Image (cartoon, grey):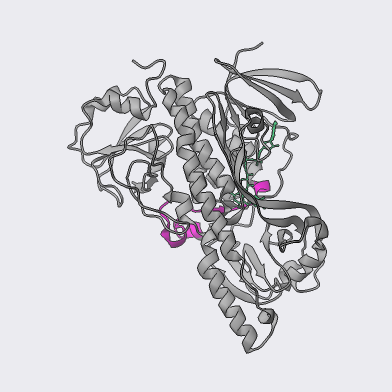
Amino acid sequence: MSEAVPVVVIGGGPVGLTLAMELARRGIETLILEKRERFELPEPRCNHVSARSMEIFRELGLADAIRASGMPDDHPHDVVYATRFAGYELSRLPIPSPGELRRNGNEAPDSWPTAEPPHRINQTFLEPVMWNRVTDFENIRIRWNTQAVSFEERDDLVRITAIDGATGKHEIIDALYLAGCDGSASSVRRALGVRLTGDDQLMTAMMATITAPDLPASRTFERAWMYWILNPDVCGNFITLDGERRWIVNVFLAPGMTPASLDFDGAVRALIGADVAFEVEHKKPWIGRRLLAERFATDRIFLAGDAAHSWLPMGGYAMNAGIADAANLAWKLAGVLDGWGGPGLLQSYERERRPVLEQVSSMVRDVRERQVVPIARELDDAGAAGDRARSELGRYMLETDSVQFACIGLNFGYFYDDSPVIVYDGSLAPPYSLGSYTPASVPGCRAPYFAIDGESIYDRIGAGFALLRFDRTIDVTAIKAARLPLVVIDVENRPAGYETGLVLVRPDQHIAWRGDTLPPALEELYGRVAGGVGQTAA
Ligand SMILES: Cc1cc2nc3c(=O)[nH]c(=O)nc-3n(C[C@H](O)[C@H](O)[C@H](O)COP(=O)(O)OP(=O)(O)OC[C@H]3O[C@@H](n4cnc5c(N)ncnc54)[C@H](O)[C@@H]3O)c2cc1C
């Protein structure tokens, strides 16, 4: 038996790949087991990468390659509400293309406080960019065509049995830690006997990838990235994959309808509203749920991404929540494996992430509830009654639904308010909603973004902790003896949201502590934010 691998990740989807890269940049060796064949594309599910995920991808050296992939650089990312593809535009949420963003100095919509605005790209384009980047890390190995089938947690390691798909042979692999990033049917979660709780059917849809080169010519309004179609016959959407020929189409099933009873081609024709030829490349139903694992972790096994939670694609935030799980978990595993992190660090993963996922999944469920509105029969009619119905529905969707495509709160607003590794000071973090965010340096919040000499503060922070000092007269010499990976960053002008002279930022850019002077018992502070004393700490 060979030596235990520090971390084995089950599942090479977006969350497993992110976790492996987050570990690798901190020098931790990782083995990914992925049951798909080498470079086998995933199903074309996710289409929206949040700004927060793009910030994380930027730190992994991925952001530019992601922006350069998928739709053409100058294709608008607008969302249009329409009666039919060849019908009436109801309303529109304008969203700039990457090219336009770049020309405007990367300003996000409404000047979001970030160097990395959201990006729209299908998962079938995203994952190949990630695979490509993974090969740059010498300490990541991927075993394709390898399915993990059983897991045994011992005091000192996790023993994994996997089957090599090419030979059919069973293999035993030992890991110090195991991450189950193996999607919603997670075998890791099942092996742990962890139940999912929540709503297991909020809606059903049929999703297909279609080739339809003549579709753009049938459109009766300006082009967009997503076309959200509402009419008395059927509701659904079209999402462009390449701006021209290939499209994702989702048909939302009316209550009582099943995928088997759906006339799919007829529904697509009703969504288009014109006689346009299309060829179905791939078709599969999906069920919109809101489910959370009761537990996210044991001592040595962790669940992340869809393995721990899955919900409706509204808000475009399910994968993105998993990317945030990976960013939260990686530095903690690295801290323990490096010896400076104590046992509380790993325990904090579930304590921090689960409440946030509970909150955001409820917000996403509410988006769906608001979408279900009566559709007036006269919506398609030319004339005053039709005009009135269209104007009302267009306004309603823009006012109540479009926030799901610009959900700043889900990106930056969530905070960890009950963590054993954060030092709270009695202040309350500002509340957030889907569409609202108030930058704050309250411990637990994401450190408010700012640029320093034209550079993102997160780039300066790097992979470890950072003490931001907004006043050079504060003595921080004692910090030099820190037993954590820690840099001091001097900032001349205190940006909005920061209230104290010192702010300690964690490797995942959330705030661990703040104050106007260093606490006299620095060891106590280190012990707290590192989850206790690690094996190699003094
Ligand atoms: C219609 C639709 C639209 C969506 N749109 C969005 C969106 O816009 N934004 C968003 O954030 N999310 C979206 N999502 C959700 C998103 O697709 C998922 O949240 C995301 O894929 C989860 O990533 P993951 O890595 O956790 O799991 P997965 O992508 O499911 O990856 C899991 C991987 O594990 C592998 N695996 C499983 N079991 C084993 C095993 N035993 N051994 C080895 N390998 C294994 C699988 O082959 C797979 O590659 C959408 C979902 C749907 C259905």
Residue 214 x, y percent position in the rendering: 77, 67
Above or below, comparing residue 474 to residue 392 in the picture: above
Which residues make up the magenta segment?
101-125
Q: Is residue 365 left or right of residue 338?
A: right
Q: Which quadrant of the render holds ligand 1?
A: top right
Quarter of image, res 107: bottom left
Residue 438 in picture, x, y percent from top left: 36, 54
Q: Residue at x 63, y 50 (%)?
A: 289
Please count the marks in the image: 0
Question: Is residue 123 inside the magenta stretch?
Answer: yes
At 65% from the left and 34% from the top, the residue drawn is 11
- In the rendered view, would you say 349 is above or below 72? above
Residue 89 picture quarter: bottom right
Residue 279, position as x, y percentages in the image: 82, 59
> Who's the residue at 58% across and 61% down the image?
369
The answer to whether residue 470 of the structure is visible from this angle is yes
Rendered location of residue 268, percent (x, y):
77, 65
In the displayed structure image, the side of residue 212 where residue 371 appears, left or right: left
Residue 115 seen in render: no
Q: Residue furthest top?
A: 1
Front residue of 275/169: it is 169
In front: 136, or 263?
263
Q: Is residue 182 above or below residue 523?
A: below
Q: Residue furthest left?
A: 473
Q: Going 49% across and 53% down the picture, which residue do you hit?
A: 117
Instruction: Specify whether residue 476 is painted magenta.
Output: no
Q: Quadrant of the C terminus?
A: top left
Quarter of the rendering occupied by the N terminus? top right
